[in-house]
Image (cartoon, grey):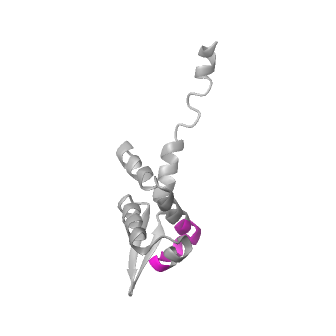
């Protein structure tokens, strides 16, 4: 994953409302939720919710599929795992380096 791609994914999660929507979709698992279900569970107004879903979808952390007259939104678990891996990939790489130079 490149820096720009990671920044876009993290930026999409950069608001309380979008995190709430994403967490709701994560809880729903692979089945996903309709926009109405997300609105009911989060209490976010429909027009605002549409904006947040567009942002999350654009960053690739949420996918949407048209099923009949409904739109099903799902968390993109592979993408979310890649973002987590990106941010954690160098965990503790510099541990101990600064401590030796502090004194």
Along the line of sight, which residue is nearer the eye, 11 or 91?
Answer: 11
* Residue at image location 50% in from the left, 63% down from the top: 22
In the rendered picture of this protein, how many numbered marks are placed on residues?
0
Residue 78 coordinates in the image, percent (x, y): 48, 59
Is 84 drawn above or below residue 58 in the view shown?
A: above
- Classified by dominant secondary structure, the portion drawn in magenta counts as helix
Q: Residue at x 38, y 80 (%)?
A: 66
Q: Is residue 59 left or right of residue 13?
A: left
Question: Measured from the top left, where is residue 72 in percent x and y?
Answer: 44, 77
Q: Residue 96 occupies which quadrant of the picture?
A: top right
Image height of 94 relative to 31, above or below = above
Q: Position of residue 71 (x, y in %)?
A: 41, 79
75 and 49: which one is in front?
49
**Residue 22 vs residue 7: left or right?**
right
Q: Position of residue 87 (x, y in %)?
A: 50, 43
Up the image or down, 71 lies above or below 54; here it is: below
Identify which residue is drawn at 51% across, 47% down: 85
Q: Which residue is drawn at the image coordinates 51% and 78% (left, top)? A: 37
Is residue 85 within the magenta segment?
no
Q: Quadrant of the C terminus?
A: top right
Check if residue 32 falls in the magenta segment: yes
Numbered range of the magenta stretch: 24-36
Q: Residue furthest bottom?
A: 68
């Amino acid at each position: 994953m490149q820096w720009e791609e990671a920044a876009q994914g993290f930026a999409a999660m950069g608001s309380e409302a979008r995190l709430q929507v994403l967490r709701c979709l994560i809880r729903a698992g692979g089945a996903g939720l309709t926009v109405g279900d997300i609105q009911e569970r989060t209490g976010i107004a429909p027009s605002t919710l549409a904006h947040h879903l567009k942002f999350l979808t654009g960053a690739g952390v949420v996918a949407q599929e048209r099923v009949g007259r409904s739109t099903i939104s799902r968390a993109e678990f592979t993408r979310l795992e890649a973002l987590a891996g990106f941010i954690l990939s160098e965990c503790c790489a510099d541990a101990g380096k600064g401590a030796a130079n502090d004194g």
